Image (cartoon, helix red, strand yellow):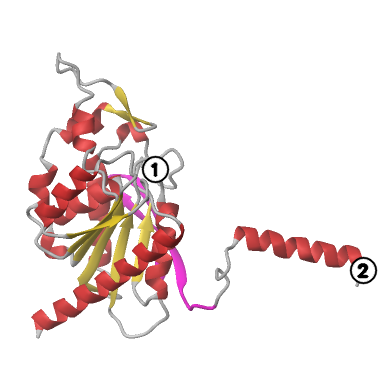
Amino acid sequence: MGKRTVLFGMLALLLLAALFPIGAFADSGVTEDVFYLERDGQRMFGKLYLPPRGTEPLPLVILSHGLGSDHRIMEPYAQYFADSGIAACVFDYIGGSEVSLSDGSMTEMSVLTEAADLNCVLDHFLGDSRFSEDEIFLFGGSQGGFISAYVAGQRPEDVAGLTLLYPAFNLQETALALVPEDGKIPDTAVIGKHTVGSVYIRDMMDFDIYEVLSRYTGPALLFHGTDDKYVPMAYVQRAAKELDAELIVVEGAGHGFTGEDRDTVAQTAVDFVRNAQVRSGMEAA
């Protein structure tokens, strides 16, 4: 074997290592299945992470991304769940971002259209015999946390547990502040770095998120960073009180978790799901 061949081989290995982190090729037995759902004539992309075949039905966690993001930000958590024997689903909201693999435009999206998307996903898996209908959990970050909490409050009997990461419970106040004194809703507005349409603001006027939260009585767990520049801690503290939930404060973390923080949050979320299963089993007995 010549030096050039060896060099090319080494370069190929380095490239693969960069594209796929250590452990990506590990034979964990987890499978990834792409699926598509349809809501009101628009297609929604999703991916299901399944642990090795074992006793069914399985618990399932449905993970929701934030405003202007997509399913990829939730994939590390989904992989963590699946590696721990818990099925997980990620998906792109319709009109959820500029890079979404689902249909739709961000100017036609709102928290209520995204709630309809999540309801569609939830209904789909409630009818899937591979999963226990009593063990479907919602997990969301930022706006995805807002949506997950909203859906949990609307249909608490269908949600076994709720995990929220840096949930953006200030979004309602932020959106309503964009309406001028004359009350005329602008055609478009900027939330964070993303342009949304008038429907986003209009739909925020239809409910009080904290009142919706109070309807959910199941187990809930919240995480929030002390250095979050987008969501003040007070909003999450109020949500934790309404949900009667534990709030875990992540020191030094911003609006998103990485590295050791993400690993710790993921493991704690897995433990939360397992504990919720145990409680549910004891109550059933």
Quadrant location of the C terminus in the rendered image: bottom left
Residue lying at 25% horizontally and 70% vertically, measured from the top left = 272
66 to the left or right of 212: right
The answer to whether 217 is drawn above or below residue 148 in the figure is below
- Residue 98: tell me if it is visible: yes
Q: Which mark is drawn over residue 103?
A: 1
Which residue is more in the foreground, 125 or 51?
51
The residue under label 2 is which amino acid type?
Gly
- Residue 116: tell me if it is visible: no
Q: Where does the magenta region start and end?
A: 27-50
- Locate residue 250, reporting x and y percent: 32, 55
Q: Main secondary structure of the magenta part?
A: strand
Residue at the far top in the pictured view: 182
122 to the left or right of 251: left
> Alpha-carbon distance for marks 1 and 2?
50 Å
Q: Which residue is mark 2?
A: 2
Q: Which mark is drawn over residue 170?
A: none
Residue at the far right in the pictured view: 2
Instruction: Specify whether residue 38 is painted magenta.
Output: yes
- Locate residue 79, reporting x and y percent: 43, 67
- Locate residue 221, reporting x and y percent: 22, 61
- Locate residue 55, reporting x and y percent: 32, 85
The residue under label 1 is which amino acid type?
Asp
